[in-house]
Image (cartoon, helix red, strand yellow):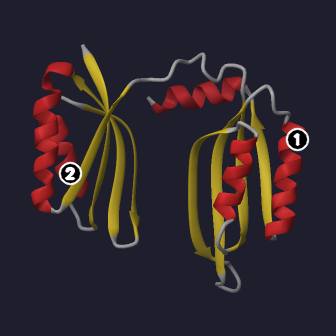
């Protein structure tokens, strides 16, 4: 029987961190199914969904714990897949936000999404230099699931209000269920 494990690893950025973590996973017969990895500040951070045989999980957890001696902090949590029925009636949308960087943008958007019962599936944020001026430009891309109780028009209206009050540009694109399903299938 297989088990799923969420693995988070953080260490000072240097070549070989991914190779070392995946060496431990591979040596215990585990499969890395999904991951997000990036350098944030001076640290390398990874979050990974790992599948392995239930009988080998304890040994793998011990192997991952040994990485602490190499300066790689690892935390783990058992998890299980979400049922495909959970979001079957939801609309899948992407939200793109661009604007001058300032405090509170993510909080403002995420709080409004929470209040409208919209679930954030993934979010990527970064600050980049604006093309012409080089001034800090905040960018946020999010994939969200909008419940049937929230209309897309009402969500767009709320995002427009945030756009105006925060002086940022926000665009929302709706995807068909087929597009979303194909994205979900291609991840695995």
Q: Residue at x 84, y 67 (%)?
A: 165
Tell me where residue 63 appears, x and y as whole percent: 11, 42
Q: Is residue 50 visible from the viewing direction of this image? A: yes
Q: Work out whether residue 178 or residue 156 is closer to the camera in this orientation and state it.
A: 156
Q: Which residue is mark 2?
A: 19
Mark 1 or 2 closer to N-term? Answer: 2
Q: Residue at x 10, y 49 (%)?
A: 66
Q: Is residue 22 left or right of residue 185?
A: left
Q: Is residue 28 visible from the viewing direction of this image? A: no
Q: Residue at x 81, y 71 (%)?
A: 167
Tell me where residue 75 appears, x and y as whole percent: 27, 46
Image quarter (top left, top right, bottom left or bottom right) of the N terminus:
top left
Q: Residues within 10 Å of mark 2 (few under 14, many from 20)?
A: few
Extreme front residue here? 115
Q: Is residue 36 above or below residue 106?
A: above
Tell me the element at label 1: helix
Q: Which residue is mark 1?
A: 154
Q: Is residue 137 left or right of residue 187?
A: right
């Amino acid at each position: 029987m297989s088990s799923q494990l969420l693995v988070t690893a953080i260490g000072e950025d240097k070549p070989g961190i991914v190779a070392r973590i995946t060496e431990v996973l591979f040596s215990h017969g585990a499969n890395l199914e999904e991951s997000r990895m990036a350098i944030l500040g001076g640290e390398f951070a990874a979050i990974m969904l790992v599948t392995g045989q239930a009988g080998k999980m304890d040994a793998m957890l011990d192997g991952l714990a040994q990485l602490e001696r190499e300066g790689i902090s690892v935390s783990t949590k058992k998890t299980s897949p979400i049922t495909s029925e959970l979001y079957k009636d939801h609309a899948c949308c992407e939200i793109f936000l661009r604007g001058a960087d300032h405090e509170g943008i993510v909080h403002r958007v995420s709080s409004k999404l929470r209040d409208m019962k919209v679930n954030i599936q993934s979010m990527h944020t970064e600050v980049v230099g604006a093309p012409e001026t080089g001034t800090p430009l905040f960018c946020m891309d999010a994939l969200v699931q909008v419940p049937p109780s929230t209309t897309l028009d009402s969500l767009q209206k709320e995002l427009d209000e945030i756009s105006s009050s925060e002086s940022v540009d926000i665009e929302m694109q709706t995807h068909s269920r087929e597009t979303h399903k194909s994205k979900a299938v291609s991840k695995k």
